[in-house]
Image: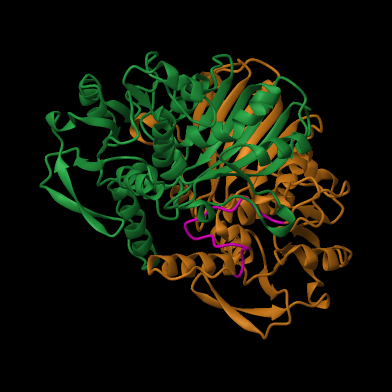
Chain colours: A orange, B green
Amino acid sequence: MLKGNQVVSIVGATGLVGSEIAKLLVLRGFPMSRLVLFASGRHQECEVRLAGRSLPVHPFTLDAMRGTGICFLAAGGEFSRRHAEAIASLGVTVIDNSSAFRMDSRVPLVVPEVNPGALGEHSGIIANPNCSTIQMVVALAPLHREWRLRRAIVSTYQAVTGAGLMAAGELARQSDAVLRGKPARAEVFPHPIAFNVLPHIDVFDSQGWTREERKMRDETKKIMGDPSMEVIATAVRVPVFRGHSESVHARFTKSVSLERARDLLSRAPGVELVDDPENNRYPMPVDCAGRDLTLVGRLRKDPATDRALCMWIVSDNLRKGAALNAVQIAERLL
Amino acid sequence: MLKGNQVVSIVGATGLVGSEIAKLLVLRGFPMSRLVLFASGRHQECEVRLAGRSLPVHPFTLDAMRGTGICFLAAGGEFSRRHAEAIASLGVTVIDNSSAFRMDSRVPLVVPEVNPGALGEHSGIIANPNCSTIQMVVALAPLHREWRLRRAIVSTYQAVTGAGLMAAGELARQSDAVLRGKPARAEVFPHPIAFNVLPHIDVFDSQGWTREERKMRDETKKIMGDPSMEVIATAVRVPVFRGHSESVHARFTKSVSLERARDLLSRAPGVELVDDPENNRYPMPVDCAGRDLTLVGRLRKDPATDRALCMWIVSDNLRKGAALNAVQIAERLL
């Protein structure tokens, strides 16, 4: 269905993820006859700078999607729930960055390094997973293939850009206020995020889990294709602009070795092993921003069992965690 | 040996922990005839403000310790290794905040809410545990008494004040620089800490664990009096001035229930249960600074086993994590 030269559209093109998708399509030379940008709301027509040129951003209408080959949706779950199926029914392949369709059994949820085969079965909509899920499965998949993952206990250190552009502004404003001895006024987050950490990302359910924590659990099972594995997540927002970090304790069905884990990770697609603590080298958010790879380090053997490892995983939440993975899905579709 | 009216001295009185000890002794009305402050190095004589008065800070000499009833050491491990035993041999009871003697079998390692009985056996030196260990055992002990803790997997979010006054200045300076688009120069930490996280606290061993992670493991076993329990820690520095947070997955020998856990924690000494996610109430560093209690929340049942819980523990690293616990040890000794 998809050809090498088609119209590509992005809805939500002025947001953090949408604009990153646009940049990556150009940077990576994605084959397209035209790139058309849309804003999700009823904004006035505006322009964005891309590769030295000004591109107009149009208000979204369903009609304007006709003739599009691939449409990236980066305008939030509500928008996707309302419009994704209608767009797909026009014959457009929709790559949806929201959580709206991720757990829909008819919709593939794809991380190209992990389950590219799932793309064969799509019927118009492909879901891009949650940012914190993507980087975790990229790092765990090569180990899972070798030793079969039984359970992962993960605590996250998530950047504010995961909550959008306004959240980044809030961290900057609050930080500046606190440094000047003024109060940190919270608008985007429920509490100040400057010089604080919030064990709260997305809404809570009746059992005390956040939706972010549920996503990490449910999406990992779907992507890895193994409903028997368990993912127990604690999702935490930290005062970092860009780059999610994760502390993972992974327990496998078979005995593991650090040497073999290092070997597997150093050859794994999308992974860079950064594990040289003697020289103070380990993954950090400041080193991943604007990069494509998922950095893995701090590998340690569980002292009490042969079947578990600790690791530290960092990736750019806007790149591999969102825009890059979506573009890689599109590349695989060609 | 100890009387209600004695000379109390603090070595390292100009540091973050030493000055907090001085403040708490006054605030809590600790019975003393005189409070004498010392700096550890060969600094010039100086003064500190305490309770509206100026107190002189003397250079440390062993001779000046004669006649002291209780001496708090807050001048680092090297100082304690060099001087603690000599001070104790003068008949002074030494409460040492450093890691120098914590794992010494002749030295009690005490958290008064957890193992006050260990104080009965001391021979002059009592060790104050590591900050991240203290708050974890305060929260886990009431659950351990009920269900016996088998293993804890913990990821920390530690404030920069755990690394001293200079580290706090570095976070402020770097944050200001980054907000102005300038580079963040690292001097105290090996990498920038502003808007970043560092999976690195204290030195690495040959197996990739940091000394901080080892401390959490070894000290917890000693304080809880159970060498068979396992603590697997990942210690991470975050850009927070004050207040350590911990994400803990705790596995017990018996079946647990959330209701019973809440009940035990709400009655536990030194603990405040803050677990009302529906109303966005959970422990956070900004809420613990300057407070005595260890805040516990985000209680969740492990979905795959009846024997495990997730929890989120926050406490002021300078208070319960250091100065308060040391003063509470002194109070118990009276």
Q: How many marks?
A: 0
User: Residue at left 25%, top 40%?
Assistant: B12
Farthest residue, direction bottom: A44
Quadrant of the frame with the C terminus of chain B: top left
Q: Is residue B121 left or right of residue B258?
A: left
Residue B185 percent coordinates (x, y): 29, 54
- Nearest to the observer: residue B54 or residue A101: B54
Residue B114 percent coordinates (x, y): 54, 28
Query: Can residue B180 be seen?
Result: yes
Q: Is residue A78 above or below residue A297?
A: below
Q: Which residues are magenta?
A: A187-202
Quadrant of the frame with the N terminus of chain B: top left
Residue B136 percent coordinates (x, y): 55, 34
Question: Which of the 4 quarters of the picture holds residue A326?
Answer: bottom right
Residue B217 percent coordinates (x, y): 50, 24
User: Residue at left 51%, top 33%?
Assistant: B234
Q: Is residue A113 above or below residue B147?
A: below
Query: Can residue A114 be seen?
Result: no
- Nearest to the observer: residue B145 or residue B202: B145
User: Residue at left 66%, top 64%?
Assistant: A32
Q: Is residue A170 above or below residue A63?
A: above
Main secondary structure of the magenta stretch:
loop
- Nearest to the observer: residue A324 or residue A233: A233
Q: Is residue A30 left or right of residue A300?
A: right
Question: Which of the 4 quarters of the picture holds residue A150?
Answer: top right
Can residue A204 be found in the magenta stretch? no
- Nearest to the observer: residue B123 or residue B199: B123
Q: Is residue B272 above or below residue A203?
A: above
Q: Is residue B54 left or right of residue B251?
A: left
Q: Is residue A101 left or right of residue B268?
A: right
